[in-house]
């Protein structure tokens, strides 16, 4: 009976391939999603609270004019931009998405600050600010910060 010997050789070197797709979301990406969603929903929260004739009335951001609607659409545009990026559709190199996020965040901060300092008196005589406008301001600042954070994450 012949005896077969097995010679152990090293396996051939593997060609480098793409890294496994176990990419965890960075802090900037999570903050972008969260800030966009909260910004969109915060325009449907009470921005102004007042009392008139024994009732306490709240006015949502959507009903405060064009700026309240623009805040909603900035949040929606942020979510659409992030959804497209996750689907693999990217913007041209001339318009980086992180700079677009910074611009959208800055616009949202300006719009919310205008509504924070310029309280419309058309609803009732004694008007106070509701919690929704402060949530909008935090979400707008979060959107601006997420754009800055994503810019810092992509630097070498």
Image: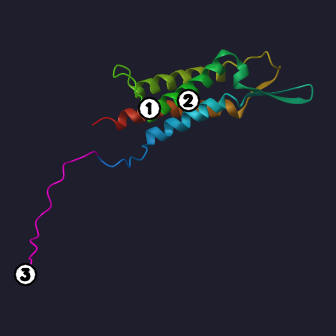
Tell me if mark 3 has few (under 14), some (14-19) or many (20+) residues whose alpha carbon lies within 10 angstroms of its own.
Answer: few
Is 12 part of what is drawn in magenta? yes
Tell me if mark 1 has few (under 14), some (14-19) or many (20+) residues whose alpha carbon lies within 10 angstroms of its own.
Answer: few
- Which residue is labeled 3 in the image? 2
Q: Gap in Å between the C-alphas at discs 3 and 1?
A: 63 Å
Quadrant (top left, top right, bottom left, bottom right) of the N terminus: bottom left
Q: Gap in Å between the C-alphas at discs 3 and 2?
A: 80 Å
Rendered residue at 36%/35% (across/down): 152
Q: Considering only order in the chain, which callout, 2 or 1, is on the residue closer to the N terminus?
A: 1
**Residue 114 screen position, x and y as percent:** 62, 19
Q: Is residue 146 left or right of residue 156?
A: right
Q: Gap in Å between the C-alphas at discs 1 and 2?
A: 20 Å
Q: Is residue 22 left or right of residue 50?
A: left
**Residue 37 screen position, x and y as percent:** 59, 34
Query: Toward the viewer: 95 or 108?
Result: 95
Q: Which residues are magenta?
A: 1-18
Is 92 part of what is drawn in magenta? no
Quadrant (top left, top right, bottom left, bottom right) of the C terminus: top left
**Badge 3 element:** loop
**Badge 2 element:** helix
- Which residue is labeled 2 in the image? 140
The residue at the far right in this view is 53
Q: Considering only order in the chain, which callout, 1 or 3, is on the residue closer to the N terminus?
A: 3
Which label is found at residue 85? 1
């Amino acid at each position: 009976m012949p005896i077969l010997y097995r010679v152990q050789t090293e396996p051939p070197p593997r060609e480098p391939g793409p890294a496994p797709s176990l990419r965890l979301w960075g802090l900037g990406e999570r903050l972008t999603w969260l800030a966009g969603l909260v910004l969109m929903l915060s325009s449907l929260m009470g921005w102004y609270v007042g009392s008139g004739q024994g009732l306490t009335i709240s006015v949502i951001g959507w009903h405060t004019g064009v700026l309240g609607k623009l805040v909603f659409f900035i949040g929606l545009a942020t979510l659409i931009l992030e959804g497209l990026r996750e689907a693999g559709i990217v913007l041209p190199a001339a318009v980086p998405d992180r700079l677009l996020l910074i611009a959208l965040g800055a616009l949202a901060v300006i719009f919310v600050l205008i509504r924070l300092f310029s309280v419309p008196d058309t609803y009732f005589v004694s008007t106070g600010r509701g919690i929704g406008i402060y949530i909008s301001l935090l979400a707008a600042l979060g959107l601006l910060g997420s754009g800055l954070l994503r810019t810092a994450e992509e630097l070498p």
